[in-house]
Image (tube, grey):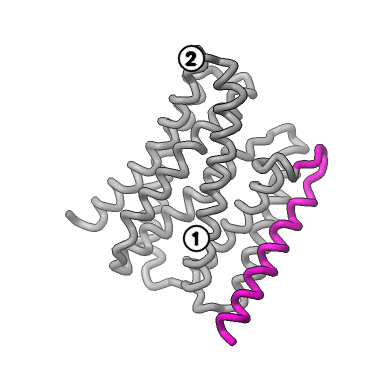
Amino acid sequence: MSEPLLILLLTVMAGAAIPVGGLLASFEHIRPQWLEHELRHFIIAFGGGILLGAVAVVLVPEGVESMGGSMLAIPILLTGGIFFFLLERKMAAGGRQAPQLIGMLSDYVPEAIALGGLMAAGSDSATLLAVLIALQNLPEGFNAFRELQRQNRSNRRTLLSMLALVPLGPIAGFSGFYLLAGQDYILGAIMLFASGGILYLLFQDIAPQSVLRKHWAPPLGAVFGFCLALFSNMLTTHA
C-alpha cells in the first residue's frame, strides 16, 4: 500500500471516531439520568486523562526530541498555553465557549500532522499514533456533542458538524507528509504549542477541581508548573 493511501486510511479512521462518539452521546433515551450524570462525568474525566496522557507521553516527548532537546521547547509550550488562555477569554466575551471541542481539535490536528511527518520519515509508529488519536477522539466526540447540545442545536445538525471535522485529519496528515518532511524542528514546535493549549484547557475547563467561575488565569499556573517540571527534567537529562 502506498504511503499517501495509508495516511488517508489512518487519518479517516482516527477522525471517524469523532462523529461515532457524538452518535453514542445522542442516545439519551437509554437511562437518561444515568447518562447525564455518571456516564457523562466519567467520559469527561476519561477524555481528559487521555489528553493529559497524549501530552505527557506523545506530544511533549516527541516535540522535545524533534527539536533536538532545545530549551526553546519551554517558551513554545508556554506560548501555547497563553494563546489558548487569550482565545478562551475572547470566546467567553462573545458568549461562545466550547472547551471540549477546542481541546479535541487542538490535539487531533497536530497529531495528524505528526502522523504524516512520521510516515515521511519512515517511522513504524504511525499506525500506533493513529490508534491513539482514534481512542482520544471517541470520548472527546462524546463530550463535544454534549457540549454543543447545550447551545440548543439539533442532534442532526450537531452530528453533521462533527462529521465535517473528519476531513481535517487527512488534510493535516498530508500537510505533515508533504510540507514538513525533514522539518523536524517545526514539527516539534507544533506539538509543543498544542501541548500548552491542551494543558490550559484541561485545568481550566475539563478538570472540575481547578475551575473558578469567571476566572481564566489560574489554570496558567498548571502550564507554568508543567514547564518547570519539563525544564528540571531536561537539565537532568542533558547534564
Give the percent coordinates (x, y) of residue 131. 36, 48
The answer to which quarter of the image holds residue 114 is bottom left
Dot 2 falls on a residue whose secondary structure is: loop
Rendering coords of residue 120 (x, y %): 31, 65
- Residues drawn in magenta: 211-239
Q: Mark 2 sits on what residue?
A: 30
Image quarter where the C terminus lies is: bottom right
Percent of width and height locating residue 58 = 48, 60
Disc 1 marks which amino acid?
Val
Q: Nearer the viewer, residue 117 or 57?
A: 57
Residue type at mark 2: give it: Ile
Q: Give me the C-alpha separation between circle 1 and circle 2.
A: 35 Å
* Numbered mark located on residue 57 in the image: 1
Instruction: Identify the residue at horizontal 47%, vertical 50% (top origin).
Output: 109
Q: Is residue 60 magenta?
A: no
Identity of the residue drawn at 41% across and 50% down: 132
